Amino acid sequence: MNLQQLEHLLALAETGSFSRASEKVHLTQPALSRSIQMLEQELGMPLVDRIGKRNELTPFGAMVLARARRISSEAQELRRAAGLLSDGQAGQLRLGLGAAPGALF
């Protein structure tokens, strides 16, 4: 399981359609379908009930979706924090002073 597969599941749940989800994540529909199938195989249970043109999450899929949202949010926050650190907008600055300047403060 990887973040990309979870993002694919999020897109599918949001759009309700493999074709619209594939457009949203810039993949072909078969590639998105394979990604979801690989996630289902790894987890050992179906995530989506494929009912004709409708796709509904299974109860297990709904649980995975809730966790995928949290994981995705944390990953985005981690990327944001890394960007702030690399731009010098966050972090700590430590100064070391010798005895003479330290006595003045």
Image: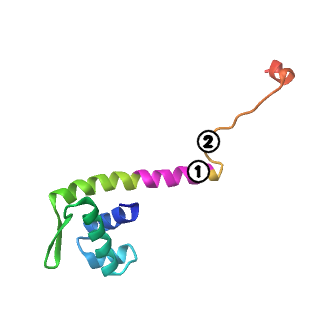
Label 2 or label 1, whichever comes before in sequence order:
1
User: Over which residues does the magenta segment extend?
Assistant: 74-85
Looking at the image, which residue sits at the far top? 103
- At 39% across and 60% down in the image, what residue appears? 3
- Figure quadrant of residue 22: bottom left
Callout 1: few (<14), some (14-19), or many (20+) C-alpha neighbours within 10 Å?
few
User: Which residue is nearer to you in this view: 6 or 88?
Assistant: 6
- At 44% across and 54% down in the image, what residue appears? 75
Callout 2: few (<14), some (14-19), or many (20+) C-alpha neighbours within 10 Å?
few
Please state the horizontal and vertical placement of residue 56, each as a whole percent of the image: 17, 67
The residue where tag 1 is placed is: 84
Q: SS for tag 2?
A: loop
Say if the magenta span includes residue 75: yes
Q: SS for tag 1?
A: helix
For badge 2, the amino acid type reads Gly
The residue where tag 2 is placed is: 91
- At 29% across and 65% down in the image, what residue appears? 39
Please state the horizontal and vertical placement of residue 41, each as a whole percent of the image: 25, 65
Instruction: Give the Cα separation between the discs numbered 2 and 1.
Output: 8 Å
Number of callouts in the render? 2
Task: Judge left or right: residue 30 versus residue 96.
Answer: left
| For residue 24, above or below residue 86 | below
Say if the magenta span includes residue 84: yes
Marks 2 and 1 close (CB-CB < 8 Å): yes
> In which quadrant is the N terminus drawn?
bottom left
User: Which residue is nearer to you in this view: 105 or 94?
Assistant: 94
Task: Judge left or right: residue 28 versus residue 99.
Answer: left
For badge 1, the amino acid type reads Leu
- At 31% across and 81% down in the image, what residue appears? 30
Which disc is residue 29 wearing? none
Task: Judge left or right: residue 77 versus residue 50.
Answer: right
